[in-house]
Image (spheres, rainbow, N blue to C red):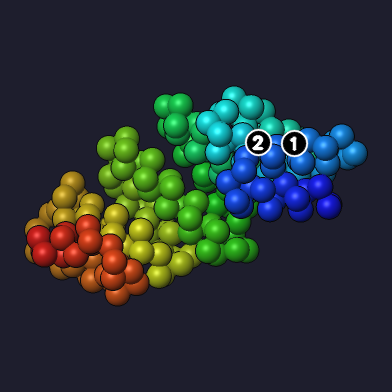
């Protein structure tokens, strides 16, 4: 735990190589210490060592198959590598496993929406953003993205324009510094 704590301190400070050294030493003492293993994966991911990060996240899941954050980070790696279907599946699994933690689940649903939008699956993206808002009504990103979808690819007339305006106004209320929300609101 002490070595992991030192690794966490280095990780937060952006000293990823030092963090990796501490986590490896912790894992020499206990190879199944999932906290050290997960943070080791994060450090590798921060350094752009994606294959090593993936391997470590998979080791975490070997210890704890319900580790939603490891699943979500694998989903991000899948998305980054172009495996969108796997990314959606993993983000969905992470959202399901995080149901008791609505803020965390909301972020996973948001990511599903982002992947679906990237794929041009706008109706499915809308559903994911709406599910995000069920979990966390004050999720500024989901409000913005949903408003933008209704203003653009899902525009179907005055009703969608009104709904887009509503979501964008809420996005601005939540995070007034989001200039893109202000711009889209002006388009409304």
Label 2 element class: helix
79 to the left or right of 61 = left
* Residue at image location 48% in from the left, 59% down from the top: 106
Q: Which mark, residue 153?
A: none
137 to the left or right of 4 = left
Residue 138, quarter of picture: bottom left
Residue 117 makes an appearance in the image: yes
Looking at the image, residue 153 lies above or below residue 170: above
Q: Position of residue 35 (x, y in %)?
A: 75, 48
* Residue at image location 69% in from the left, 42% down from the top: 19
Q: Position of residue 120 (x, y in %)?
A: 27, 37
Task: Look at mark 1 in the image and give the residue it sits on.
Answer: 21
Q: Are marks 2 and 1 in contact (CB under 8 Å)?
A: yes
Task: Look at mark 2 in the image and give the residue it sits on.
Answer: 17
18 to the left or right of 171 = right
Looking at the image, residue 124 lies above or below residue 162: above
Residue 168, quarter of picture: bottom left
Name of the residue lying farthest toward the bottom: 173
* Residue at image location 58% in from the left, 46% down from the top: 14
Residue 86 makes an appearance in the image: no
| Disc 2 packing (10 Å; few <14; some 14–19; many ≥20) | some
């Amino acid at each position: 735990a002490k070595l992991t704590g030192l690794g966490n301190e280095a990780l937060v400070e952006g000293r990823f190589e030092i963090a990796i050294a501490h986590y490896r030493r912790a894992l020499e003492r206990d190879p199944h210490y999932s906290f050290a293993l997960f943070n080791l994966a994060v450090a590798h991911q921060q350094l752009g060592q994606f294959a090593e990060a993936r391997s470590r996240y998979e080791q975490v899941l070997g210890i704890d198959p319900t580790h939603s954050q490891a699943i979500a980070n694998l989903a991000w790696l899948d998305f980054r590598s172009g495996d969108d279907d796997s990314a959606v599946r993993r983000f969905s699994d992470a959202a399901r496993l995080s149901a008791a933690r609505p803020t965390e689940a909301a972020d996973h649903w948001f990511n599903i929406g982002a992947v679906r939008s990237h794929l041009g699956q706008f109706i499915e993206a809308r559903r994911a953003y709406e599910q995000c808002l069920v979990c966390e009504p004050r999720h500024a990103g989901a409000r913005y993205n949903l408003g933008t979808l209704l203003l653009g690819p899902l525009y179907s007339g005055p009703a969608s324009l009104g709904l887009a305006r509503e979501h964008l106004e809420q996005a601005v209320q939540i995070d007034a510094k989001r200039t893109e929300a202000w711009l889209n609101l002006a388009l409304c």
